[in-house]
Image (cartoon, rainbow, N blue to C red):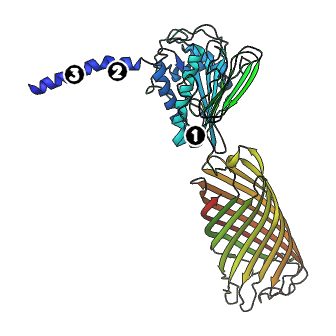
């Protein structure tokens, strides 16, 4: 019996609390105001989802259920809007009015270097005018995106107060058409055609839909006035004071030609322009907030706001040094010796895959698009040459390949570390193939020096994947052999290509995969004085040596 009594008491208390909870949901200052908030545009890694969720939650607390963004997209399709129209204020206004929204709050996130900017446009669906253009900046999407969504929501609510918006106001009147069909009039929560529309709350609104990476189409605004609003947090005070510490600045233009600039060194600053002909500049020091007319602006004026986040000390998007170190193998090492008679010498050979150590480094001059690059690869070698009728030749040795380049970085798209680049370069290549002494010394040590030019491409597809490739080539200006030579007057060409992949695990560290192919051809005049196999004709002359080399390595890259 006591259990039944307690259960009944709980049920009664729950019944009494339900009306209180319902009334708590309805106590927002603009309950019933119809607003559509599409999913913020921008890459997922930029905090798109967190910002959208926080913004919608903030607006739901103020206005109640939102107009479904899914229905907004359906209306855009019915209006046959192209991509540009779907992004324009006029196009959003037409679609918003078609689903009964009084306003559309559209947000786009962009990135430049380390800085992320969330730009919010509040669009009046009756006129297509942009009533607010507010920008909030941040550096850490995972930490700051949700907070910026809340700030945009609070600033929007303040704007409603400035505009004198009435609770329950919904779309009405005509709007300029933006699409393949004529513009429609708002009909409350009814689609064009009479289908009933359901409102979405935060949990029910579907995110996504359109391509988030499209840039906003800026078709201008219809009013000549603008308001610049810079604040750490919009807060709730009519005087513009905020909950954050630091200087806050606001510029409000609501009409004609009078301007008042009021600057406080430690508090809030607002500039209010109303109709009139006088100009007044007032500067004071102290920590208090200076209202200078508060947030007031005439209904229908445009608001251009910027919220700045102080840049972290030492944070710089430029890079000065890149270094990668890897280990791998020489997949191909082919040496061919031929004479004018057309016969290949028995000394021609191909080495088995070899172990490899590789270093790549690049120094980029600060604020100058010039770089110096050094690439080095070293391989220990164990030769095993089989010559018919003679004993196998098995000396040890090593192969060293060095490349020095000076490059000029030409940005073709993007910014900071996300810049797509073309990098023309000039430099030199030095190669040393060393063979230990053996009998009868038929394998020669060689040294090659070439003057080269190249063209490289660096493509950072996103924050993780970066692809680089390039070609280079030039003239061999120095070639020597020891002991003996394959002839006189050595000259030739060298051609090479690189393909590199960087998988950035963080801003500074990446997995590095590097590949290089080199082709080298050297021609000689006259008769060789090197030791030749007994099976080789002794009257050969005008030798040609070609070398093909392919290597690959994997390791770690850093940049700073």
- The residue to which callout 1 is attached is 46
Q: Position of residue 51 (x, y in %)?
A: 53, 33
Drawn side of residue 478 relative to residue 321, left or right: right
Q: Which is more foreground, mark 1 or mark 3? A: 3
Q: Residues within 10 Å of mark 3 (few under 14, many from 20)?
A: few
Position in image of residue 98 (x %, y %): 57, 13
The vertical placement of 48 against 479, above or below, is: above
SS type, badge 2:
helix
Residue in the foreground of this view, choosing between 465 and 237: 237
| Residue topped by disc 3 | 11
Q: Residues within 10 Å of mark 1 (few under 14, many from 20)?
A: many
Q: Residue at x 76, y 57 (%)?
A: 365
Give the Cα distance between marks 1 and 3.
46 Å
Residue 217: in sight, yes or no?
no
Counting from the top left corner in percent of width and height, residue 430 is at 78, 72
Mark 2 and mark 3 lie on one chain; the one further toward the N terminus is 3
Q: Is residue 131 visible?
A: yes
Q: Earlier in the sequence, mark 1 or mark 3?
A: 3
Give the quadrant of the C terminus: bottom right
> Mark 2 highlights which residue?
21
Q: Is residue 461 left or right of residue 545?
A: left
- Are there few (<14), some (14-19), or many (20+) residues within 10 Å of tag 2? few
Foreground label between 1 and 2: 2
Residue sitting nearer the eye, 512 or 103: 103
| Separation (CA) of disc 1 from disc 2 | 35 Å
Q: Position of residue 492 (x, y in %)?
A: 86, 70
- Based on the displayed image, in which of its 4 quarters is residue 512 positioned? bottom right
* Residue 554 as seen in the image, left or right of residue 338: left
């Amino acid at each position: 019996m006591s259990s039944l009594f307690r259960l009944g008491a709980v049920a009664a208390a729950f019944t009494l609390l339900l009306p209180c909870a319902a009334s708590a949901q309805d106590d927002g200052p603009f309950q019933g105001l119809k607003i559509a908030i599409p999913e913020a545009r921008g890459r997922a890694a930029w905090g798109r989802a967190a910002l959208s969720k926080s913004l919608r939650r903030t607006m739901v607390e103020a206005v109640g259920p939102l107009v479904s963004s899914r229905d907004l997209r359906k209306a855009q399709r019915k209006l046959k809007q192209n991509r540009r129209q779907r992004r324009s204020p006029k196009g959003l206004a037409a679609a918003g009015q078609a689903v009964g929204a009084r306003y559309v709050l559209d947000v786009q996130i962009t990135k430049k270097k380390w800085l992320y900017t969330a730009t919010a446009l509040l669009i009046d669906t009756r006129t297509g005018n942009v009533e607010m253009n507010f920008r909030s900046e941040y550096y850490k999407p995972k930490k700051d995106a949700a907070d910026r969504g809340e700030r945009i929501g609070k600033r929007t609510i303040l704007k409603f107060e400035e505009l004198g918006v009435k609770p329950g106001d919904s779309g009405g009147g005509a709007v300029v058409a933006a699409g393949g069909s004529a513009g429609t009039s708002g009909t409350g929560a009814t689609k064009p055609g009479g289908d009933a529309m359901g409102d979405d709350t935060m949990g029910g609104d579907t995110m996504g839909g359109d391509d988030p990476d499209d840039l906003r189409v800026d078709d201008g605004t219809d009013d000549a006035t603008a308001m610049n609003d810079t604040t750490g947090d919009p807060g709730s005070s009519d005087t513009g004071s905020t909950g954050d510490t630091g200087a806050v600045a606001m510029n409000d233009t609501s009409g004609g030609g009078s301007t008042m600039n009021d600057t406080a060194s430690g508090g809030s600053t607002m500039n209010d322009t109303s109709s009139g002909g006088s100009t007044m500049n007032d500067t004071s020091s102290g920590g208090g907030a200076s209202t200078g007319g508060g947030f007031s602006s005439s209904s229908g004026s445009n608001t251009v706001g910027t919220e700045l986040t102080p840049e972290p000390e030492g944070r710089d998007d430029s890079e000065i040094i890149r270094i990668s170190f890897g280990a791998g193998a020489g997949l191909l090492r082919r040496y061919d010796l031929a004479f004018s008679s057309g016969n290949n010498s028995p000394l021609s050979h191909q080495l088995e895959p070899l172990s490899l150590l590789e270093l790549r480094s690049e120094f980029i001059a600060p604020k100058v698009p010039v770089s110096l690059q050094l690439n080095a690869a070293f391989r220990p070698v164990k030769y095993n040459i089989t010559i018919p009728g003679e004993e196998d030749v098995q000396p040890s040795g090593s192969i060293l390949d060095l490349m020095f380049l000076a490059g000029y970085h030409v940005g073709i798209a993007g910014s900071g570390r996300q810049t797509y680049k073309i990098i023309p370069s000039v430099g030199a290549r030095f190669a040393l193939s060393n063979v230990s002494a053996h009998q009868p010394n038929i394998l020669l040590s060689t040294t090659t020096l070439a003057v080269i030019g190249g063209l490289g491409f660096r493509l950072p597809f996103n924050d993780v994947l970066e692809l680089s490739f390039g070609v280079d080539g030039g003239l061999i200006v120095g070639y020597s052999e020891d002991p003996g030579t394959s002839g006189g007057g050595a000259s030739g060409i060298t051609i090479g290509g690189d393909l590199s992949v960087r998988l950035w695990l963080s801003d500074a560290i990446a997995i590095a995969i590097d590949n290089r192919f080199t082709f080298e051809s050297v021609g000689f005049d006259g008769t060789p004085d090197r030791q030749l196999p007994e099976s080789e004709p002794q009257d050969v002359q005008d030798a040609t040596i070609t070398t093909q080399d392919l290597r690959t390595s994997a390791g770690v890259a850093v940049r700073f």
